[in-house]
Amino acid sequence: MKLIQPGFPRPLGATLTRRGVNFALYSRHATRVELVTFDGASGAESARYGLERTGDVWHGLLLPRRAEVGTPYAFCVHGPNDPARGHRFDPDALLLDPCARALSRAKPLRSQVIDPSFDWQGDRAPATPWRDTLIYELHVKGYTQQHPAVPEQWRGKFLALTCAPVIEHLKSIGVTAVELLPCQAFASERLLLDRGLRNYWGYNPMAWFAPANEYAVQDAVAEFKTMTKALHQAGIEVILDIVLNHTAEGNETGPVLNFKGIDNSVYYRLLEDKRHYENLTGCGNTVNCEHPQVRALIIDCLKYWVEEMHVDGFRFDLATVLARDANGFDERSSFFQALRSEGSLAYVKLIAEPWDLGFGGYQLGRFPVGWAEWNDRYRDAVRAFWRGDEGRIGELAERFAGSSDIFRHNGRKPTSGISMITAHDGFTLNDLVSYDQRHNEANGEGNADGHHHNLSWNCGVEGPTSDPEILALRKRHMRNLLATLLLSQGVPMLQGGDEFARTQRGNNNAYCQDNEISWVDWELCRTHADLVDFVRLLVQLRRDHVEFRRETFLKGATSRVGVRDVVWLHPRGAEMTVEDWRDGTLRTLGMWFGKHRQSASRLLLLLNAATAARPFVLPAPHADSPWRRRFDTASRSSDALSLEGELVFPLAPSSAAFLEC
């Protein structure tokens, strides 16, 4: 055993200092901890050092000649191997550092010392208010792997998102924030590897602080920072889809990578029979966020991504897990309190996937003030309405108005809801209007995986077709869905590539498809340029009219200056009555914004999900300003059209129209 200086118990992980590299690891039940370093070229073990203990932290400082930037290292942790008591120590296991800022690129994987310095050149986040935010969800590799303007060596990498044509497209459609699917270092499950597949989405982390080497040309840390800086310079925020609810170690049959061998009973939620793991995530294990040390580690991780990597927010996968204690989800949990007590985290964007797989796991609407939540009830209501399901008018109106029934408590706002039609998990927009059933055969699970309740409609033919009428109907249906999304209250989220009809060939669970099924085909951006232009128009309308970006819920109320925020209209031109709302056969609705006691309105959105045309009686316009059509999804033209003298709008089957005066 070689000599090592005592060092310090904080911060955890490997920290480059003027005196050398300080190493620190938390393990309450360990009896001894060894730091192992390796030769960077050969990968062979070069030295082994015993660490000192202060409280429950093991630490030591290596002088520069023994450790430097790039040095690979691991921990060997001694202690009882007694699964019945929750302990799985194995002194022969070479464990990854839970706080490693980088992993080596060679096999086997090792933690790696980094130099955190980077020339940010005064980088500042755009800090777009929630009400003005448009989120664009994308996968770093899938979005750029086939982009023709990205240099070949950068395709599928962080650096691809620094390329001018990529950024120009994002800006052209009004994106204010990209939400990146997991970028933490992750592993593929053995079952996938045995089928010749891999975990493509990345929801299987093994090092929370380390960016994935899969998305780097050489240096994942520096290249992630370069990407973030470039997006910030373009006025685009970076939101990281982060996985803190489980790890790649799986259940009792899974691999030992770090937490299991460092202090299994601390880091994971165990069943009464401590040999087994509580599986609230469907991934084999559940991180024990109730434990103070685990909670502190999560907070440190979030602070690192904000302070050192300059991300602007997080979307928390299966976020309910983070606030669970022995009694279930607690909206006043210590995790929420700890998060908001950190200055650097107080104002970042926080987005919850507000459910997990455990009892009482569905918690939509119960997250604290300051959080936004994925609103799956919005998704389902909009899909069902446009599919033509009966009795959906009232639900659609509630979701369009901001879902006050879900979020109106404790001072929360419409921006508490993330409105979405599609996301990575499920059909793409094109597939939502092209398939009635999932087609996940390529996943090797007998087409039994993925959602079965898709609320989709194939418009008459399952999958690809050359029928021009079917293709035109699908395009119209996509426009209807996009118009609803981008003109609703709440924060809209667009899935990357939906603006030009990206397809996954009917696969609604493409988590293991690292191939053309998941990769974005940028040729579609040219062939569906009309759909891209329509998205641009919708985003511009949203920007131009504050009625679509409110800080309060639509409720039909009259303001002090005599303006009603919304009037819900029946096609006959009158305000909807109680009987109208109860009419299960009604599939047509008008939304009249800005009605004034003494003058006509400004904006009118008309929706018709019926299979028949529906003439819609219009409110009287200003005397000197006739209604003007800004779009009609049944028309190929997006040019504005004056409706002078017309008091009835011919609303086509399955269409939406927007008028202003």
Image (cartoon, rainbow, N blue to C red):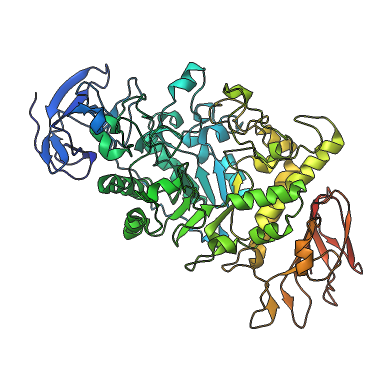
Left or right: residue 71 versus residue 559 is left
The residue sitting at 60% across, 28% down in the picture is: 448
* Pick the front one: 299 or 359: 359
Residue 255 pos. (x, y %) = 34, 24
Left or right: residue 46 versus residue 182 is left
Residue furthest front in the image: 272
* Pick the front one: 654 or 499: 654
Residue furthest right in the image: 645
Residue 307 pos. (x, y %) = 34, 50
The residue sitting at 23% across, 17% down in the picture is: 44
- Figure check: 407 above or below 508: below
- Figure check: 395 above or below 288: below
Residue 115 pos. (x, y %) = 28, 38
> For the C terminus, which image quadrant?
bottom right
* Pick the front one: 114 or 253: 253
> For the N terminus, which image quadrant?
top left
Residue 342 seen:
yes
User: Hey, which quadrant is residue 240 in on the image?
Assistant: top left
Residue 399 pos. (x, y %) = 64, 58
Residue 535 seen:
no
- Figure check: 22 above or below 626: above
